[in-house]
Amino acid sequence: MDEQLRSVGIKEDERKEIIRPYVELIGFDLYIVFHQSVYGAFIHLSKNRMLPEDGMSMYEWQNKWPVDGLVSIQRYLSGGSSLTVYMKDQIPQSFPDPAVSEKLKKLAEKIGPIYDGCLRRGGYTEESFKFLETYKGKISVPEDYYRVLIEGR
């Protein structure tokens, strides 16, 4: 899309405004992978009776997350670093398994630069396609996100 707009002579400021909603949807898609990974971790920990020390239930955690889709995180989609900070802030501080919490933080840190690449390109990058395929191509339920997060498959 970005290259097509340039080829027809669209000015840079106009181009950025035209592609912004499209690239924000990519950012939201990346965010959903993160959200579902945290949710999958909650489900896994709940099944194994490992709940956060502060007693936050999965349902309380779910209610804490924004429900307005893209609109609810749009202000964090200006760049990968702001998206990363926002995602890391969504990880419950009291995850009983520090290794899971650390992997979730690393996932957020991985998503930020992928999103920055999409912003620069004005669309999907090869890295974003590969990343999303890892998740979207193999997942049918939220706990599968946990499996990909922990096992890397």
Image (spheres, rainbow, N blue to C red):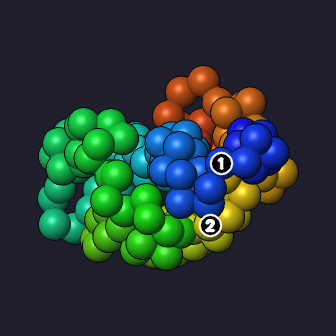
On the question of residue 99 being in view, the answer is no
Q: Which quarter shows the N terminus? A: top right
Q: Position of residue 98 (x, y in %)?
A: 46, 75
Residue drawn at the location 74% of the way across and 30% of the way down:
137
Q: Which residue is mark 2?
A: 116
Gap between marks 2 and 1, in whole Å?
A: 22 Å
Residue drawn at the location 72% of the way across and 31% of the way down:
138
Closer to the camera, 149 or 26?
A: 26
Q: Position of residue 71 (x, y in %)?
A: 29, 42
Q: Amino acid at mark 2?
A: Asp
Q: Position of residue 57 (x, y in %)?
A: 20, 48
Left or right? Give the position of 145 relative to 72. Answer: right
Left or right? Give the position of 11 relative to 18. Answer: right
Q: Which quadrant of the view contains residue 107?
A: bottom right
Element type at marker 1? loop
| First of labels 2, 1 by sequence position | 1
Q: Which residue is mark 1?
A: 10
Residue occupying the far front of the picture: 9
Q: Depth-wise, is mark 2 or mark 1 nearer the camera?
A: 1
Q: Amino acid at mark 1?
A: Ile
Residue drawn at the location 16% of the way across and 66% of the way down:
54
Element type at marker 2? helix
Q: Position of residue 48 (x, y in %)?
A: 42, 47
Residue drawn at the location 62% of the way across and 66% of the way down:
116
Query: Is the residue under label 1 in contact with that under label 2 (CB below 8 Å)?
Result: no
